[in-house]
Amino acid sequence: MSHNYATPMTPEKRLARVLSRIPADWSIRVERTPGEGDAMSWRAAVGPQQAGQEMEWCTGHDTMVDALEAAWRHARQQ
C-alpha cells in the first residue's frame, strides 16, 4: 500500500516557488488596493526592466501570492 507523503503548499512555499521562477533581472511590483466593501485586493506586475515601457498589472486577487503568480504567468507568455 503506497502513501502520499507530499506536504501541502503553504503561502510561504508558494511565494518562494514563484519568486524562484522569476528571472533575477526582471522587476516586480506588488500593490494592495481597496476592494469591494472592507476587502483588500492585491495586484502585481512582473517583467523585464525596459526603459520607457510600463509593465502590465494583473487583475485583483485575494492574496499577494495569487496576484504575483498571475502576473508571472502573464509576463512569461509575452
Image (cartoon, helix red, strand yellow):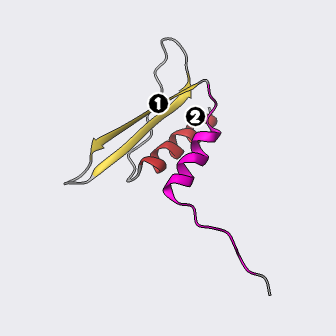
x and y, in percent, of residue 57 in the image: 43, 34
Label 1: how many Cα within 10 Å (few below 14, some 14–19, many 20+): few
Dot 1 or dot 2: first in sequence order is 1
Q: Relative to 69, say whether 2 is above or below.
A: below
Q: What residue is pinned by disc 2? A: 75
Secondary structure at numbered mark 1: loop
Q: Is residue 9 found left or right of 35 in the rendered image?
A: right
Q: Does 6 appear in magenta? A: yes
Residue 32 image offset from top left, x and y in percent: 32, 41
Q: Which mark is residue 23?
A: none
Question: In percent of the image, x 41 and y 52: which residue is there?
Answer: 63
Q: Mark 1 points at which residue?
A: 56
Q: What residue type is labelled 1?
A: Glu
Mark 1 vs 2: CB contact within 8 A: yes
Image location (x, y in percent) of residue 72? 56, 39
Quadrant of the image for the N terminus? Answer: bottom right
From this viewpoint, which residue is outermost toward the top?
51
**Is 71 colored magenta in this rendering?**
no
Q: Give the range drawn in magenta.
A: 3-24
**Can you tell which quarter of the image residue 21 is in?**
top right
What percent of the width, then of the height, locates residue 46? 52, 32
Q: Determine the residue positioned at 62% across, 31% down.
A: 78
| Rendered view: 12 above or below 51 | below
Residue in the image at 48% along x and 12% along y: 52
